[in-house]
Amino acid sequence: MSASGIAPHRGTPPVVTGIGVVAPTGIGARRHWESVLAGKSGLGRITRFDPTGYPVRVAGEVPGFDAVREVPGRLVPQTDRFTHFALAAAEAALGDSGVDPASLPEYEMAVVTASSSGGTEFGQHEMERLYRNGPSWVGAYQSIAWFYAATTGQVSIRHGMRGPCGVLCCEQAGGLDALGQARRLLRTGSRLVLTGGTDASLCPYGLVAQLASGGLSTVDDPARAYLPFDASASGFVPGEGGAFLTVESAASARERGAHRYGEILGYAAGFDPAPRTGRPPVLAAVIRRALADARIGAPEVGVVFADASGVPEQDLAEARAISEVFGAGAVPVTAPKALTGRLYAGGAALDAVTALLSLGHGVVPHTAGPGRPAPGCEIDLVLDRPRQTGPRTALVLARGYGGFTSALLLGAADTPLTPH
């Protein structure tokens, strides 16, 4: 029993009561959702620095984000852009949920975030000062602003959340892993978990680091640079931003009379074997374990939000895994991240938010851009326009560089909802 008198319910799925979005498709859940339905892309030529001379010049940048307006003034020079995004998204998620952290026991509120690169841009500026001016010019905040857990710490301090806190560094898969960890914490006594992920590596140092993966598209046309599952796929476009979610026990949400975006029904994770080992990819097995965890069958899944790397061999492996579990073309598949680029730790968290909005509105959003299915990708990829199919369960997939693989099952709320 918690101090508030609410016991954890192991058999009752946790619920999402608030969402906050900072993405290339817009700031705020409503603007993001409108962009997704309209197929309005947030991809364009990089403007945060001059990309001339770099092989990658297209990215998904968050439009109109003003850290001075969104973040407490003293924190702006002390933290990196990825933390600025997180503070704004976390504030929005809490506001959307209608919860006042000051009214809850501080040790029953937890923070779990995902991070892929940490404070890359902050670190770049400090290194520039080091090499140009000497060590005395390097600020004290470099020691913490670059750190993967910087966001977790700043969010927990800002909102007085002193329960279990942590960060997961699993690249793209991290956003789903953070939600999986949030569910575990709710089962062991936490009342509320603020969770999600953001990344912001659109700086020279960050872009060069990303090039090492070999997966980035070098196409200069934003409309053709990121075409997952398409015959012309040439890799993915990098992006920045992400999303946060307020996740609560069903009892806590019921006690507050909170609105619900949906439930976290099931989760599973695995790790792909190293290349040339002869062992098969783990995605199909991870999907099956997530279904088993949720205690539902494959036919009950109404939509799959694909990882959609845009790298042809990775797309083919994902399509085969989906077909293996559900049957060829048996379930609608979508990849709204074609509008944002891959946001790394922020990408899967944003996909989870988009999936909840999809369930709440009864709409499967389309994948903007692709037109010619890649050979062997026998999936029902939703193209051209959204489908009004009324899905009740969504599967979100994510794979991170190096083999991280995760799957999350979300269920619709009892009542259709619109974000505030």
Image (cartoon, rainbow, N blue to C red):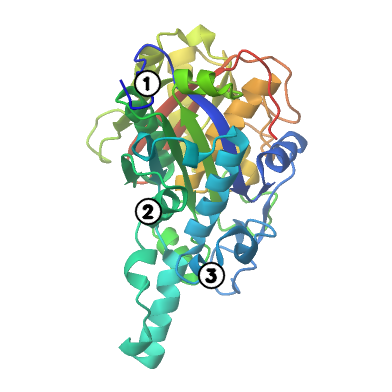
Q: Nearer the viewer, mark 1 or mark 2?
A: 1
Query: Can you tell which mark lies on residue 36?
Result: none
- How many marks are shown on the rendered structure? 3
In whole angstroms, how far apart are the C-alphas of marks 3 and 2?
Answer: 34 Å
Q: Tell me, yes or no, if residue 232 can be seen here.
A: no
Q: Quadrant of residue 382?
A: top right
**Mark 2, secondary structure of its residue:** helix
Q: Which residue is mark 1?
A: 5
Q: Earlier in the sequence, mark 1 or mark 3?
A: 1
At horizontal 45% and vertical 65% (from top left) the residue drawn is 79
In whole angstroms, how far apart are the C-alphas of marks 1 and 3?
Answer: 57 Å
Disc 3 marks a residue whose amino acid type is Tyr
At horizontal 60% and vertical 34% (from top left) the residue drawn is 98
Q: Which residue is mark 2?
A: 153
Query: Can you tell which mark lies on residue 54?
Result: 3
Is residue 285 depicted above or below 173 in this figure?
Answer: above
